[in-house]
Amino acid sequence: MPGVQAHLESSDPAVRTLGMVVAKTLTQTVAPTGPKLEFELDHNNPEVADLLSYKNLPKDPGISDAEKAVLESETKMKHVTIEEELHSMSLQDENANGSSTGDTELDSDDDLQPYDMSNDKKVEKGKQPKFIRDCMEGLICSSDDPDRTEVCLSSAEALIRKKTDGLEEIAVEFCKILLHMQDTHSFHNFETNRFGSLVALTVTCPSQVSEYLTSQFYERNYSIRQRMDILETLASAAQELSDVDKGQQNQSSKDVGAPKKSSMVSSEASSWREVIQRRIESNTRRFAHGRTRPEPVPTLNR
């Protein structure tokens, strides 16, 4: 009713007409025997005639025969699909039972003895490189052939320590490859082989490699781990070049023999000093001797 009242109070004639028609129709429907609302409506107006035509709505015709046929066909299809699903489920159960019996039959194969695999040769991942340049190429193509890269990295240190001809010309480039190399494929002993190769390069070509490593230490495109690798490589190479371990062994052997030598020297020194002292005393003439009588004891006067 508040909506009808709002329509009746509107200044728009079309809105007011809509409110009057709705109010009249609503009162006749709610209270058909009660007082009727009468408004001055222009029945010749097409809008009013259209609104009044909605009063006499047709009755619900219900479901037609065609719709009934469609519903019946849908219900039949549902029954058919349910039966097919049940049939497929039963087939799956039968297959499962058959596979279980087959598994029980296959279990009997466990009694068979396995083949002797002791004399089989392991399949090698790749051929070991024989030249330095082949090793460098294998380290570069890590993304294309990781097995070859792993083999080249494991044999790099041995190739470098052979000191082949032309190593000094490619030492810096080889060091650059090793320094920037990353373990993207989780190689076996990657850090150990890489560090050993860097140390071998620095020991074999110290002037070229050490100059390159020291120049690259303060560059911006290196991580902390790479800078630590540079320092550790230089330190290990310096120890190997100076033979620190051998020098320490020699020093320790000298220290072990030192106490015996010092004891011998001290005993010899004491012996010749005694001999000299005896000779001095034998050649010394004494003109006065010490007191032969004891000093008198003082007493009180009587």
Image: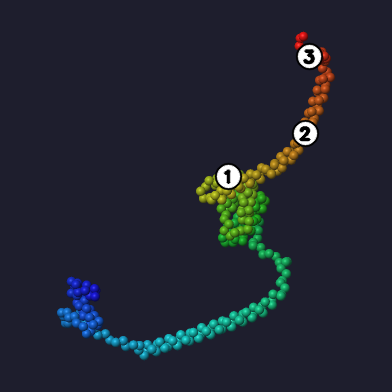
Q: Residue 252, how many percent across, how many down?
A: 72, 41
Residue 261, by quadrant, is top right
Marks 2/3: CA–CA distance: 51 Å
Side of 117 where 44 appears, left or right: left
* Dot placed on the residue nearer the N-terminal end, 1 or 3: 1
Rendered view: 124 above or below 246: below
Q: Evaluate whether residue 51 shows in this view.
A: no
CA–CA distance between discs 1 and 2?
50 Å
Instruction: Name the secondary structure under disc 1.
Output: helix
Judged from this view, the residue extending furthest toward the right is 282
Disc 1 versus disc 3: nearer the observer: 3
Disc 2 designates what residue?
Answer: 263
Q: Earlier in the sequence, mark 2 or mark 3?
A: 2
Single out the residue that lies furthest toward the bottom. Answer: 65
Whether residue 48 sits left or right of residue 148 in the image: it is: left
- Residue at label 1? 211
Picture quarter containing residue 262?
Answer: top right
The percent coordinates of residue 22 (x first, y second) are 22, 79
Q: Nearer the viewer, mark 2 or mark 3?
A: 3
Q: Are marks 2 and 3 in contact (CB under 8 Å)?
A: no
At label 1, which amino acid type do we have? Glu
Q: Is label 1 or label 2 in front? A: 2
Check the picture and name the quadrant holding the N terminus: bottom left
Does residue 137 sit above or below 118 in this rendering? above
Between 81 and 35, the residue placed more toward the observer is: 35
